[in-house]
Image: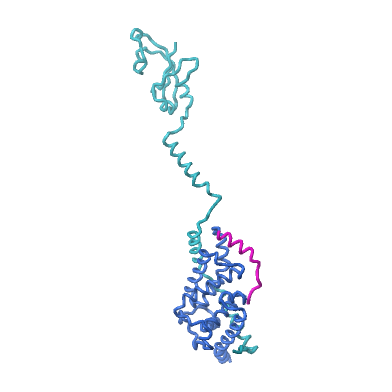
Amino acid sequence: MSEPVLEPGQETLLDLRLDALRAELATHSPPDALEAALVGTFRKVRPVDRPGLWWMPPLALAATIALVAWMIRGPVPANQDLLSLASSADSDPPFLALQPLDRIAQARGATVRTSEFPRALLADWGLPVAPERAGESVRAQTLYSADGVPLAVRLLN
Amino acid sequence: MPMPPEDPQPELALLARMKAGDEAAFVQIYRKHRERVYRLALLYCGSAAGAADVAQETFMHLITHPGQFDPARGALGAWLCGVARNLARKDSSGREDPTDPAQLADDMSPTFADHDSPLERVLRGEAAEQVRRAIAALAPHYRDVLILCELSELSYAEAALVCGIDIGTVRSRLSRARARLAQSLAPFEHHAREVTS
């Protein structure tokens, strides 16, 4: 089969027509939505192995555990001095807690007052009182909450 | 016109990153080849919607089967064009003419009507649309080499790989395809002269 031969004029005309087609094709592009669809497919088919973020899940788990533990335990005592007052064991007699320690620790604006009162009152706080000395007065330092509730007491001489 | 070969290394590096799951690398590859693939599909399908479908399937094939690309056999762009060409032909296989040259002899379709959408105007330019329809009416084995070599910038070697023929056959088919295209466009040339004279 012999090869067909175009005359030079025909070649030129054909090239011009093909150029027109190339120029027209150059104005056509795929729809923009195609890229988004393909990227979506890419994410499904080839899930990214992100070596830089491997620590994220364990860190999130640890943070969650810490937060839950903190919420269950309650706020950290803000006034450590009160706790040390209530359970101090220095040269003075120690304070005897009249309320749960955590409640003492949470007390705001607590004050220590020195006063004298009938020894019999100690029985109301659950402290031992010898009947023969119930009528005597006793000198004590009492830790009061801001609303006047006695939190701890220390008997002085 | 076939472009001079470019350094394949940057694109191969991108492809390696894409295989490792790098989305940005895939987007770079897509943006580099999307027009070429889409326009080739437009020539095969004859409709914008069909071309978009073929382009999408082509890049999905790249995502799911990147290992099928062999850099020793040609550039990535040529491989993508080959995938798009096969998908477009498969898509229209129910309507496609036989591709065996012996069966086709020198017959040529007498009309320029597209198989897919005879009434759809794909291109805005009158002259460009005439040529597109004339190409669509060529026998598939001529249409292949014309679209791949003349309009998709594949080298003869790449077109030979895509079509599964040797380079000499690509040359001869291209020569015949051009002759048949010129022949089929001749009436339009006469008509244009009559109108302008």
**Closest to the observer: A36 or A114?**
A36
| Image coords of residue B151 (percent x, y) | 58, 77
In which quadrant of the rendered image does the N terminus of chain B lie? bottom right
**Closest to the observer: A92 or A145?**
A92
Q: Is residue A63 above or below residue B26?
A: above
> Residue at the location (57% across, 68% down)?
B33
Does the segment drawn in magenta span residue B5? Answer: yes
Q: Is residue A82 above or below residue B93?
A: above
Q: Which residues are magenta?
A: B1-19
In which quadrant of the rendered image does the C terminus of chain B lie? bottom right
In the rendered structure, the colour chosen for chain B is blue
Q: Quadrant of residue B149?
A: bottom right
| Image coords of residue B167 (percent x, y) | 62, 79
| Image coords of residue A129 (percent x, y) | 36, 12
> Residue at the location (64% across, 88% down)?
A9
Q: Quadrant of residue B35?
A: bottom right
Which residue is farthest top?
A132
**Closest to the observer: A97 or B79?**
B79
> Residue at the location (58% across, 78% down)?
B165
Chain cyan in the figure, letter:
A
Q: Quadrant of residue B22?
A: bottom right
| Image coords of residue B24 (percent x, y) | 56, 59
Q: Is residue A94 above or below residue B102?
A: above
